[in-house]
Image (tube, grey):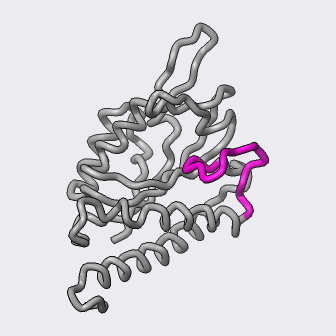
Amino acid sequence: MLHEFRLSPSAAPGWDTFAEQVSNRLPQMRDGLYVFFFTNDLTEVVRDNNRGREKTVIHAAGASLKPGKFEGGLVRRMAEYQAHLHWVDTLGRQNWVFTQCFRFGILLDLSQCDLGLPSSARVFERYWIDSVNQFIDKERLWAPIRQLARSEWNYIEASGWSAEVERRLRDFMHDRADRILKMAAVAGSPSGTVP
């Protein structure tokens, strides 16, 4: 099942409030796929120091679409972003900005998929990421910034984003989610057919 998540407009942007809202709205999501939309209103780039390799993930005054998987709970995955996304001030201090940059997420819950493997999300992650890249291509949203090939952080043109583009992304990801769930049903069926 596909879900959408965004912070309540009245919510404070702190991590505790954010984590509580995720836990309250989507408590049963252990494993799945996501695409997150981030914007950066700062004049500095937002960086990710995941795995000790610091890289730019949202350019100054820019936006990014980030697809991926989560295993072991959605809050756990978001806590990793909270611990990694930052900007660096002129004194070299890191300032954590996940909740200030996060705008919304589209989430596919695969917690109930039983493929006989430790992670259904891992099986479908590449297809999900490629689908998001296909959407960005189709909508011509790529920002004119050099980007590493096959990066999961997709720099997009912030000025090209609108409520209509968001609606089309939601529809597109619904289609991809339906395909994934059908593939999972076939893979999990003893006869190899859709139950």
The dominant secondary structure in magenta is loop
Q: Is residue 98 above or below residue 106?
A: above
Q: Quadrant of the C terminus?
A: bottom left
Q: Is residue 106 above or below residue 148?
A: below
Quadrant in which residue 181 is drawn = bottom left
Quadrant in which residue 187 is drawn = bottom left
Task: Specify the segment rendered in magenta.
Answer: 140-154
Quadrant in which residue 125 is drawn = bottom left
Q: Residue furthest top?
A: 91
Q: Residue at x 70, y 64 (%)?
A: 137
Place of residue 11 in the rendered image (x, y in percent of width and height, measured from the top left): 38, 39
- Residue situated in front as seen by the camera: 27 or 73: 73
Q: Is residue 2 left or right of residue 97?
A: left
Q: Is residue 154 left or right of residue 68?
A: right
Q: Quadrant of the N terminus?
A: bottom left
Place of residue 92 in the rendered image (x, y in percent of width and height, measured from the top left): 57, 11
Place of residue 76 in the rendered image (x, y in percent of width and height, measured from the top left): 29, 42
Whether residue 81 appears in magenta in the rendering, the answer is no
Q: Residue at x 57, y 47 (%)?
A: 153
Q: Is residue 143 above or below residue 141?
A: above
Place of residue 96 in the rendered image (x, y in percent of width and height, measured from the top left): 47, 26
Q: Residue at x 74, y 62 (%)?
A: 140
Q: Residue at x 26, y 58 (%)?
A: 29
Q: Is residue 3 above or below residue 13?
A: below
